[in-house]
Amino acid sequence: MPTELSNKLDYFVDAQNLTVSQFYVLDRADGARLNITGTGTGQLSLVQSLYGVGDGATTFRLPDLRGEFIRGWDNGRGVDRERLQGSSQADVFQHHQHLSGIGTAHLVSQELNDDFSRDKSTRPRIGAVYGWGNYYTAATTEYRPYTDQTQPRADTQSDMNYDINAGLDNGKFTSGDPATGKPPSRITADWANAVSEEIINAVKGGGLTPSSAADQLAQVLDTLRTIAQAVKSDTDSLKRRTGDLWQAVMPVGTVLHIAAPEAPAGFLVCDGTGISRTTFPELYKLFFLKADGTARFVPKTVTASVASPSVFTSSGHGFSGGERLRFSVSSGGTIPAGLYTSGDYYVDPAGITANTFYLLNAVGGTRVNITAAGTGTLSCMQSYFGGGDGLTTFNLPDLRDEFVRGFNTGTFGRKQLDAIQNIIGSVNLDVTTQGTSGAFSSFNWSDGGTAGAGKLRKWYKF
């Protein structure tokens, strides 16, 4: 085997410059095309897999979602073309320009040529999920189905009309009245036979033999009611069995993405709501107890300096940044001024030592200031998503408008703010040595005037 290849590692096909019989391979270490300096011996073969073939004999690999955003496979939709199922994508910016005009010796104009949505965050493309397709019409106070096609009007009601030649009297057959000249009802053989066959078929369908008995249709209706009740009972039983199966294949704590505005039976909306510890004991155990039944979190004794910002000290706290904390004080004590027992705070990832840390008043917020010391013993209690009132409730995770990212290492349950990668480049504005490097480039532009009149300008973009 060529020395640059290993049969214990996976490589990836470069999507660029593919031909029917040739392709480039990317090095998994740095993403660059693999260079081969010498050929091996024997026949070289490859095996394709979605997530890795393991040792090639007895094992295979699971998908590695640590630190990754999960994106639905395009599968012909056309939003994310030419990407294979199971493949990975690096982060990328959509093509855009920032333009600024430079005169012969100074900045003469500036233009921003971006087309942003004026949103508050940088984020990947979001596909809207529609759970239902109804619209409300106030004039008729009813819901009507939305459709994307032209279709004829559908009438859900129809009247059973007798033959127009039957000579009905107020919708019923009549024997006629010779005194008044009213003729008797007239029916055709086809019409009479059709009605008779309908009645006979209904009687047979109810398991009866047609006869002259007057209550046979009533007996059929009783049979239908019995069947309907049995079907309802079976349906209720099926729902119960399905619920048991649902719990078996989806353990407590499963987060389900549903294309509907309401949570299905057995699920709660992840909106940060406080819920009862006794009503949802299994979910509470998942958040606050380990598999062996011991507590995930124990209270930590803390001291807070009177300072701006305050330094919090807790011996061997073990925090890494982003932990959610709720504070309490011993009976009869008072909380330090600037701190509250009714809200959560977050450990600042910056400035952590083995025994000290700073607190943020929100994710990505400002550090907490303490203006006066409290009394009694100050303690903090960690939770993943919030400890509720600290006694009878706890909080669900709040995933509204959030991208769910696979847990890698660090603090489980923590949030991250949106961020833009650092873009590095330089522009030299000196008249004689103008130039660019890194993320910047330049080009000349003229509006048709003479160069001496300052009409020739240099534009820089990145």
Image (spheres, helix red, strand yellow):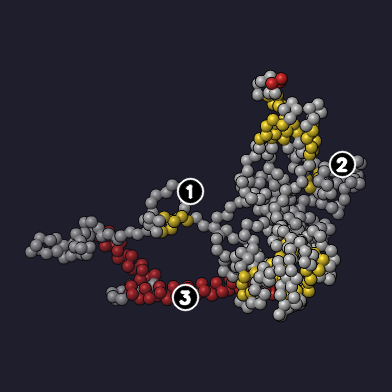
Q: Which of marks 1 and 3 is nearer the N terminus?
A: 1
Residue sitting at 22 percent across and 63 percent down? 171
Q: Residue 391 carries which label?
A: none
Horizontal side of residue 180 vs 266, given as left or right: left
> Where residue 145 sits: x, y (%)?
45, 55
| Residue at disc 2, secondary structure | loop
Q: Residue furthest bottom?
A: 331
> Where residue 368 sits: x, y (%)?
73, 63
Would residue 73 be visible to someone looking at this image? no
Mark nearer the viewer, 1 or 3: 1
Disc 2 residue crowd, few under 14, some 14–19, many 20+, Cα 10 Å = few
For label 1, the residue is 148
Q: Earlier in the sequence, mark 1 or mark 2?
A: 2
Residue sitting at 62 percent across and 70 percent down? 274
Q: Which residue is nearer to you in this view: 290 or 53?
A: 290
> Where residue 199 sits: x, y (%)?
32, 67
Q: Which amino acid does label 2 sit on?
A: Asn
Q: What residue type is labelled 3?
A: Ala
For label 3, the residue is 230
Horizontal side of residue 176 vs 395, given as left or right: left
Asked if marks 1 and 2 touch (Cβ < 8 Å), the reply is no
Q: Which residue is nearer to you in this view: 449 or 187?
A: 449
